[in-house]
Image (spheres, rainbow, N blue to C red):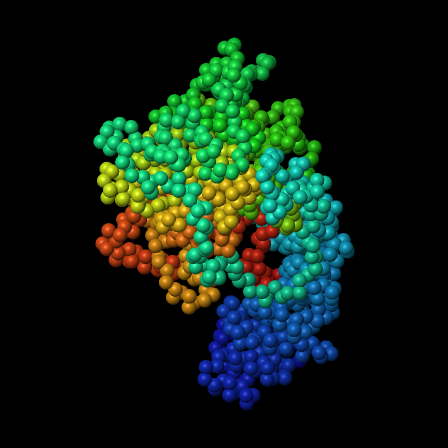
Amino acid sequence: SGPRDDNAQCSNRRVNRSNMYQTCSELTSCCCVSEKTRKEVMAKGSTGMEVILSSLQSTQDLQTILNILCILNELLTVAGGRRVGVFVSKGGTAILLHLLISSGREASPSEELMHQIHSLLAKVGPKDRKFGVKARLSGALNVTVNLLKQNLQNHRLLLPCLQVLRLYSSNSVNAVSLGKSGMVEMMFKVIGPYTKKNTTLLKVALDTLAALLKSKMNARRAVDRGNVPALLAIYLDWHRNDTRHRHTLLRKSILGCIKNITNIKLGRKAFIDADGIRTLYNTSAECLPVRTLDLLVNTSSLIMRKCFPKNRLPLPTIKSAFHHPLPQVPASSPAAQIYSQPPDVDDVMDESDDNEETEVDTENDTEDEEKEHKNDDIETDINKLRPRHLVLRPFDELRVYERFFLEFSEDFQDFDFESSKSTSPFTPHAPKLQRPIVIPMGRTPAGPWAYPRNRHPRQDAHEPPRPNDAPMGVVFKAPKDGPEQDIEQALGCLALNTSDSMNGGCTGAGPQEEGGDQAVLEVPDTAALLPLHDPDLYLEMAKATCSVPGYTEVAYPDYFGHIAPNFREHILERVYGVQRAKIFQDIERLIHPAEILDRVVYDLDICPVVDGESLKFNSRFESGNLRKAIQVRKFEYDLVLNSDINSNHYHQWFYFEVSSMRVGVPYRFNIINCEKSNSQFNYGMQVLMYSVQEAIGGSPRWARTGSDICYYKNHFSRSSIAAGGQKGKSYYTMTFTVTFQHKDDVCYFAYHYPYTYSTLKMHLQKLQTMCTPHIYYRQELLCHTLGGNGCPLLTITAMPESCSSDRVCQFRNRPVVFLSARVHPGETNASWVMKGTLEFLMSSGPLAQSLRESYIFKIIPMLNPDGVVNGNHRCSLSGEDLNRQWQNPSSELHPTIYHAKSLLQYLSAVGRTPLVFCDYHGHSRKKNVFMYGCSVKETVWQTDINASSCDLQEDLGYRTLPKLLSQLAPAFSLASCSFVVERSKEATARVVVWREIGVQRSYTMESTLCGCDQGKYKGLQIGTRELEEMGSQFCVALLRLRRLTSPLELRNHHTHQLDMERDLIETRCNMTCPTTYVMEEDEPPFMEEVDYSAESEEENDPNLETAQLDPNSDLEINNQDTLT
Ligand SMILES: [Zn+2]
């Protein structure tokens, strides 16, 4: 029978579609011809599908085959995808492919047969993960290719063949092979200019072409044949003619081809040469008003960004603008790598921005790759997980640290407990003889850091010279001459003046009409609200702070202080289309270059001459970070951040001043050299702004500000030197818009609430004055930093009630809690949490007293003062992350870590291993406050490498403190905690203190920089009030922990504790989403979805794809009508 009859038969079947039962019985009677099949039918457990497939295999009769295929086509269509799965699982794909091959061998295969087979394969392929491989291995590719070549005009056959070809092409190996068979050219023959006909066919051909062009080899050949301008012309043609947007998906498929072809460098060049940016920019601009065309605009934007010529950062070098010579530069250190570069090496941009070193198609079947997210960072070596009992340092070496632990030997025999109750606080006695380190409380005339040099714990320490103690005062710079003088100029800067001619105290230049060069500055009276703040004291502290650039100015916010606002600051809802709008503005720079000012208005490297109206910038103050500002448009600035000193990256922290603004005009700021691949700025976090006018008006505060905030990959190329050897990386832009409210204001912007080293020194001074007779408080100098700043060490506990031996014994033997913070300078939130802890510890309430009676606190509130002073984000002056140096710290390069670890080693050596160690950090990519701890068991569970080791015994005490915190602190989230030991963290404080010192409760406490998504503060951005509360709640939790661990009370709480911990274990086991996987730095992966990346594959909407593939969907049937 001929094709016509076949058709007729099929139509017949369609009539019967409603009665599948009848169809099936027909089929059964049909296949019962075969003896084998009958047995199959009778066999227990066999299904209808098996019967059908078995019949298909056993029959040779064309008509029977066609009948069966026709039935299958109906079966698989009617029940949607469900039966397709059964079909695939029963081996249907292989049977169909076999049928295709054997039919293909015939001289003139039945067209109807080929149509039926391809139609079926088009349905089955998407459900069969191995379809591409099966097709290639069976030799089916050539049969379809030959059929296509011979039937280009036969649309009825062409459609299913193209659909199958598209499925073949999704396998990368197949795509290469099909490209060699001329299929790319073939697709261009099918795709023509705009037409209302055969659109289904066109769509499939375009999708096939796009799949083929994913192969770099195919893409190269397509570029060579001039296909890029051709595709652009086709796109433009459809854009102009499809005025009613009936074929949006088809237009998107054309863009899909362009997108894939521009994955190779040649393709991008061809795209630029063909003026593709302008074409896509203009078409997108016309599409923007129609929301349904978003998918076109988004894909266009993706292509434009990808093809946008890579720029170099506008810098002479990415090395920090500041230099600090190191006492020694170990060959393996980052600083050595930086300074060993020949001077002529361009570290800003590589010679070539080629990110396709290997433009060769991989010979892997992508379908075969099981993308298991294997976590290879988790420590799997059980021996490494077990706490090491290292060969201890010789005690003689540690003996020098005895002086920091006077409380262990204090006997209070000279102390008058009776009179102290009503008079001054106890001054821990210095010094009988060899104990000179103790600072007398509150009576040091020369300030807290004035230690006799020779009493420094490291006698041999190399120490830089200290600043002189010349009298200092605060002055405002004298206003410049000219009629424009105003308060803004007067506010120009707050300078530390070391000359003798200046009087002390706070003076400033007021409005010019007052005529004087200096006038009294209104300092907001914040003493009542900020008990730890004192502007004059701040200046005194700042004066003695050593900075690499030699700062002589003080930023107003640090001087005035910050009072947390009373209003709530909600996490911003992301506005739809903001990112796109910003990216289009960036692309416009290329399209309308004449409108771009490109004027450098601030530069740490050179002093720019600024003419014309622009904002004034400044970052030359403690913790400041802004390297360069470039005015791009009248109200838009590109900002470049400075690298950490002796480093060429770590740009995240910023803190700078802006003045000369216009009121009521939106200014756009773009920080263009961000490095992280994502940021909480994409999820509602705002920058912080401090207005000096508002401060003077009575509201000295940092407040969240900025609109149109987003974070996205930009076109500034990142050299492989700065990207860990990876080529072709880009920087990211963080953009925000601010409208200033006050005329003549001076405003400051910061990444997070600043907390300078001078602020810490001021707070410690003030805390000291809070000391009561009940508090035992010592403030000592642990060591000096590379930059010459002192690293304070605090000891806080309660005074014994009397000098009776049992009281003194209790005093001396309290368990030690060791706390530290701010090893990472950019994590200023850690300092605010620490401030909360310290204030609680020095407070007079019964809980605080009880806590002091329970523990001896040893606290290093700032492990990296130099990094903080110099505006670093992550490193110390050695250019290294100090929280990666705990395994083997150098006394020369990492003195604070060296001595902090030594203190812990001393404690361990004298049998006083701390009960708790906690290092406070900030987290830039997660919300809430949470902890990382160390557990062998939970690490083993994560990797699941060795189930038997689950039996190992482990005290669950490490979970108690986080659990208590989750009950006490509203910002704390237990679900975000992790107790896994990662390989990349083996040199962090947490892991080293756990493994080497043997502290079971060794933690990193991470506070969000953004806000909370649970608890009382859900939906709010975090502020200093919440951070300080976290610090004080940490204290309350420690008090409860003491009650749980106290030997006296243990008996009562024992069962309770076990219950709680069993509950913890269960919580852990039930956790569906492990938060433990750590990708970079301290940060676990970002769970939220983000649409910022130029690499994102946004086009795989499965519903759309399958709708297009299914030839029997309504759309398809309509189009078939147009075919006939
Ligand atoms: Zn950190």
Compared to 284, does 362 lie above or below?
A: below
Q: Residue furthest right?
A: 225
Q: Nearer the viewer, residue 389 or 732?
A: 389
Q: Residue at x 38, y 22 (%)?
A: 525
> Residue 190: x and y, percent?
71, 60
Point 63% across, 63% down: residue: 170
Q: How many marks?
A: 0
- From the image, which quarter does the N terminus lie in? bottom right
Nearest the eye: 896 or 625: 896
Q: Left or right: where does residue 803 sit relative to residue 493?
A: left
Query: Is 511 placed above or below 553 here?
Result: above
- Snapshot quadrant of residue 345: top right
Q: Residue at x 70, y 65 (%)?
A: 178
Residue 342 vs residue 69: left or right?
right
Furthest residue in direction front, as rendered = 433
- The residue nearer to you, when weighing 183 against 74, is 183
Q: Position of residue 241 (x, y in %)?
A: 67, 49
Pick the front one: 770 or 484: 770
Residue 941 left/right relative to 5: left
Q: Say which residue appears at 57% left-offset and 72% top-offset.
A: 73
Q: In the picture shown, does residue 875 fall above or below 141? A: above
How far across and down, in percent of the image, does residue 984 sit?
Answer: 52, 53
**On screen, 990 above or below 791?**
below
**Quadrant assignment for the C terminus:** bottom right
- Evaluate whether residue 297 shows in this view: no
Residue 376 seen in this snapshot = yes
Q: Residue furthest bottom?
A: 35
